[in-house]
Amino acid sequence: MTGEYQHNLDAKGRLFIPARLREELGDVFYVTLSMERCLSAYSGESWRIFSDKVNAMSYVKQRKMRPLFAYAARCELDAQGRILLPQNLRDYAGLTKNVTVIGCNNHAEFWDSAAWAEQNAIEMTPERIAAAMEELDF
């Protein structure tokens, strides 16, 4: 998934999902916590792959994954292309009004727009881009 999109949460906590990302996420997808103060959204297929990887882990390692499943929400698009984000997920990511939706390879991320601007300023330097390209052996 690729791209950066600006949207707003409505008063009920619904977020519009851009058409380009809806095609890849599908009508039903999963939203959960991320390592950063944002949310990650996975298509049903990506979520199944993730779950299979967790199932293959030892019980002790599976327990470390507990928050990702406890806070995960199965989200369904409404007729207007929106999902309802549960309050606990909005609280975790600090989502109140302005939300930046970004494509991030095999998932999408939902960021508070101010937090994304700060993160983006750190990541969008020629040095960071060069380091990322080097990781890919470009």
Image (cartoon, grey):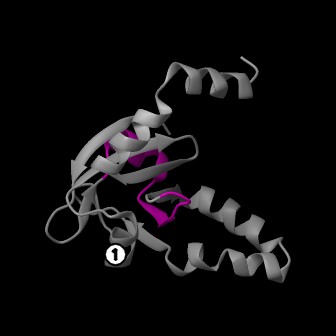
| Residue drawn at point x = 43 percent, y = 43 percent | 119
Secondary structure under badge 1? Answer: loop
- Indicate yes or no whether the magenta region holds residue 121: no
Residue 30 at what x, y percent from top left? 49, 65
- Indicate yes or no whether the magenta region holds residue 27: yes
Closer-to-camera residue (6/123)? 123
Closer-to-camera residue (108/121)? 121
The answer to whether 83 is drawn above or below residue 67 in the figure is above
| Quarter occupied by residue 10 | bottom left
Residue 72 at what x, y percent from top left? 50, 73
| Residue drawn at point x = 19 percent, y = 58 percent | 97
Residue 87 at what x, y percent from top left? 31, 77
The answer to whether 120 is drawn above or below residue 90 in the figure is above
The residue singled out by tag 1 in the image is 86
The answer to whether 21 is drawn above or below residue 44 in the figure is above
* Badge 1 amino acid: Pro
Q: Going by the image, does 93 lie left or right of 81?
A: right
Closer-to-camera residue (131/70)? 131
How many residues crowd around disc 1 within 10 Å: few (fewer than 14), some, or many (20 or more)? some
Q: Going by the image, does 112 lie left or right of 74?
A: left
Residue sitting farthest toward the left:
11
Which quadrant is home to the C terminus?
top right
The answer to whether 103 is drawn above or below residue 29 in the figure is above
| Quarter occupied by residue 80 | bottom left
- Number of residue marks: 1
Residue 69 at what x, y percent from top left? 58, 76
| Residue drawn at point x = 83 percent, y = 70 percent | 56
Q: Which residues are magenta?
A: 17-36
